[in-house]
Amino acid sequence: MAARTALFVVDIQNDLATDPATRIPHSSRVIDAAGKVLASTRRQLDSSRQDASRPLIVFVQHEEEASSGALVRGTEPWKLVFEPREGDGDEILVGKRTRDTFESNPDLADKLKGLCVTAIVALGIQSECCVLSTCKGALSAGFKVTVLRDAHSTYDEGGKTAVKIERDVEAELAAAGAKVVDWKSVVVVS
């Protein structure tokens, strides 16, 4: 069977992306990039339903206990900005309780491999937390990984700007074997 690529849309949730009181500083950039990458991937998916190499879209949604944070299942902060299309088997939702989507879902790598996924393209929030950990988890599971520059971000932290943290994460992932490309390079205009 043909190899497939899975787009991972990591933790683009209301608390982190849309709430003016809690969103990351560059949330509008991430939402814009994610929206365009997602629209392009969906166009590709819709035009290749019979193609065994069609993409898969994985929406990752973090949840935690109320004592740990705001991303409590069923609450407004927990909700996704972008959601899978209902009834579309090529768009799946994966919940998680740890930074690494694969650690939270031990059967996920095998499930993806069973769907012929060999590569993962990642974007989302927060760069140094769930994006980094999920990409490392994917690399450890044997997937090729691409992280999309300017389609992931975080908060300013520890004297570093969000953009500096983004670049540090990209450098760390590149050193681990991932590719880093500008998100615009993966958008197919139709």
Image (cartoon, rainbow, N blue to C red):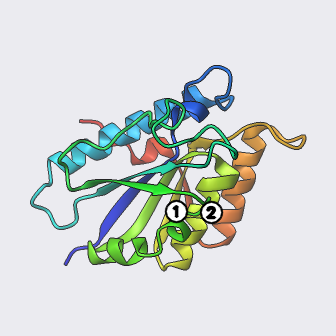
Q: Amino acid at mark 2?
A: Ser
Q: Quadrant of residue 48?
A: bottom left
Q: Which mark is residue 127?
A: none
The residue that appears at 59% across and 23% down in the rendered structure is 19
Q: Specify the farthest residue to the right.
A: 159
Percent across and percent down for residue 45 are 21, 50
- What is the x, y in percent for residue 174? 64, 65
| Closer to the camera in the image, 136 or 3 | 136
Tags 1 and 2 in contact by the CB under 8 Å rule?
Answer: yes
The amino acid at mark 1 is Thr
Residue 125: x percent and y percent?
A: 59, 44
Mark 2: which secondary structure?
helix
Secondary structure beneath label 1: helix
Spatial separation of the CA atoms under disc 1 and disc 2: 8 Å
Q: Find residue 74 and report its horizontal and vertical position in percent.
A: 45, 38
Quarter placement of the N terminus: bottom left
In the image shown, does 181 or 26 lie closer to the viewer?
26
Graded by Cα atoms within 10 Å as few (under 14), some (14 to 19) or many (20 or more), the crowding at tag 2 reads many
Residue that appears at 31% across and 37% down: 39
Determine the residue located farthest toward the left in the rendered image.
50
Badge number at residue 133: 2
Which one is closest to the eye, mark 1 or mark 2? 1
In the image, 51: left or right of 155? left
Answer above or below: position of 118 versus 20.
Answer: below
Quarter occupied by the C terminus: top left
- Which of the two discs, 1 and 2, labels the residue nearer the N terminus? 1
Give the residue pinned by disc 1.
Answer: 101
